[in-house]
Image: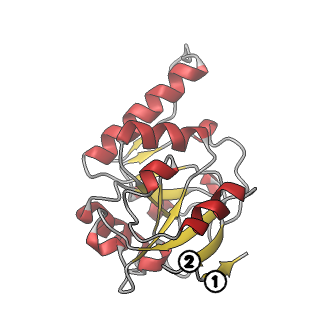
């Protein structure tokens, strides 16, 4: 049964306590193989534990799509990221450090995540979000989190929670309160793909 974090108590908890409670609940759901609907520094996303193959399959079913290229993962730091891509060239991390807006890297050598996240070429889309809720959740969970747009296949990417269709909302196990969305860009991240030898291809500016 889906839970929604509405914070309807008459005596609302302090912001820090409320944020910690939302992070704890989202982490609990993810550890149990559940799906969450959550804000990022770009747009709202559907998420799950990126190492859980059954949870990943639930997202494909919910979105009516098996497109592995639409499923990136969020990591809390470069140290965490390198555990899941073992053939990434050094230039990729230099570019990531210089980025001034949300950037997804497509890197070779995907490892340690659910097999149904990895396309035939063995790459993995990864991003380190500049977003308080996401960073706290990633540290709490201790594993990368899938992030994919909260839309049905072929439909427009929703920027805010009210734009997300009821089918998607009903299909997850926990909806994060929008009070924690911060200041998202409202658009998808840029995407750059890197080859093992440092080859660079801009996929989306």
Above-or-below relation of 181 to 41: above
For residue 11, what is the image quadrant? top right
- Circle 2 is placed at which residue position? 194
Which x, y percent locates residue 24? 39, 32
Name the residue nearer the viewer: 188 or 22.
188
Name the image quarter holding the C terminus.
Answer: bottom right
Q: Residue furthest bottom?
A: 120
Q: CA distance from mark 2 to mark 1?
A: 7 Å
| First reached walking from the N terminus: tag 2 or tag 1 | 2
Residue 49: percent from left, percent from top = 34, 54
Circle 2 residues within 10 Å: few <14, some 14–19, many ≥20? many
> Residue 120 at what x, y percent from top left?
35, 86
Q: Is residue 188 placed above or below 199 in the rendered structure?
A: above
- Mark 2: which secondary structure? strand
Contact check, label 2 and label 1, Cβ < 8 Å: yes
Q: Which element is circle 1 on?
A: strand
- Residue 61 sits in quarter: bottom left
């Amino acid at each position: 049964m889906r839970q929604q974090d509405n914070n309807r108590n008459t005596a609302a908890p302090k912001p820090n306590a409320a944020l910690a409670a939302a992070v704890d609940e989202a982490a609990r759901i993810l550890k149990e193989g559940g799906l969450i609907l959550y804000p990022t520094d770009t747009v709202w996303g559907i998420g799950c534990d990126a190492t859980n193959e059954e949870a990943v399959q639930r997202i494909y079913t919910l979105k009516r799509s098996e497109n592995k290229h639409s499923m990136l993962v969020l990591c809390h730091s470069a140290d965490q990221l390198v555990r899941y891509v073992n053939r990434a060239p050094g230039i990729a991390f230099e570019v990531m450090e210089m980025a001034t807006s949300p950037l997804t890297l497509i890197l070779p050598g995907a490892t340690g995540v659910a097999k149904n996240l990895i396309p035939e070429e063995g790459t993995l889309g990864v991003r380190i979000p500049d977003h308080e809720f996401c960073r706290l959740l990633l540290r709490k969970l201790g594993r990368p989190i899938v992030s994919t747009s909260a839309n049905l296949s072929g439909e427009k990417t929703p920027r805010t929670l009210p734009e997300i269709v009821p089918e998607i909302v009903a299909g997850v196990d926990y909806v994060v309160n929008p009070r924690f969305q911060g200041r998202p860009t409202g658009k998808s991240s840029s995407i750059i793909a890197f080859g093992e030898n440092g080859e660079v291809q801009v996929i989306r500016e």
